Image (spheres, grey):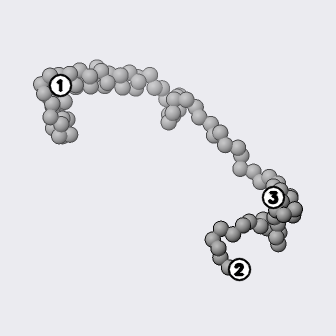
Amino acid sequence: MPAITREEVAHLARLARIELTDDELDHHAGQLGVILESVAQVGEVAAEDIPPTSHPVPLTNVFRADEVRPGLTAAEALAGAPVVDGEPAVEEDRFRVPRILGEEA
């Protein structure tokens, strides 16, 4: 049964530069002992036929496969252009948009 002594807790506290009272040393020694026992129990249960995991719940990729699929042609995309002054806002096979910076062409 793993256990940690009060002196070991005091040593760890000194290394971590944590000031602990006598009551805190006793309290943490007990708690750390319980933690070490729990870790030892897990080590006893783990068998060689159980593969190591990084997560307790098996996760699968939720993204779709990266496959090439046909998209819109330029004509199909431009067919959805907004109509401005009765005509589609298309110019030279591109969407025509209003100027926003006041630049001269």
Which residue is under mark 2? Answer: 105
Cβ atoms at labels 1 and 2 below 8 Å apart? no
Looking at the rendered structure, the secondary structure element under dot 1 is: helix
Q: Is residue 70 left or right of residue 21?
A: right
At 40% from the left edge and 26% from the top edge, which residue is drawn?
A: 43
Looking at the rendered structure, the secondary structure element under dot 3 is: loop
Tell me: residue 54, above or below residue 1: below
Which residue is under mark 1? Answer: 24
Disc number for residue 43 = none
Amino acid type at circle 2 is: Ala
Tell me: residue 86, above or below residue 35: below
Q: Between disc 3 and disc 2, whose residue precedes?
A: 3
Q: Between disc 3 and disc 1, whose residue precedes?
A: 1
Residue 51 picture location, percent across and down = 53, 32
Q: Is residue 30 left or right of residue 97?
A: left
User: Depth-wise, is mark 1 or mark 2 nearer the camera?
Assistant: 2
Query: Is 35 or 19 nearer to us in this picture?
Result: 19
Quadrant housing the C terminus:
bottom right
Amino acid type at circle 3 is: Pro
Amino acid type at circle 1 is: Glu
Q: Between disc 1 and disc 2, whose residue precedes?
A: 1
Quadrant housing the N terminus:
top left
Cβ atoms at labels 3 and 2 below 8 Å apart? no
The outermost residue toward the bottom is 105
Which residue is under mark 3? Answer: 82
Q: CA distance from mark 1 to mark 2?
A: 77 Å
Tell me: residue 69, above or below residue 29: below
Q: CA distance from mark 3 to mark 2?
A: 22 Å
Looking at the rendered structure, the secondary structure element under dot 2 is: loop
Classify mark 2: residues with Cα within 10 Å, few (<14), some (14-19) or many (20+).
few
Q: CA distance from mark 3 to mark 1?
A: 73 Å
Q: Is residue 92 left or right of residue 57?
A: right
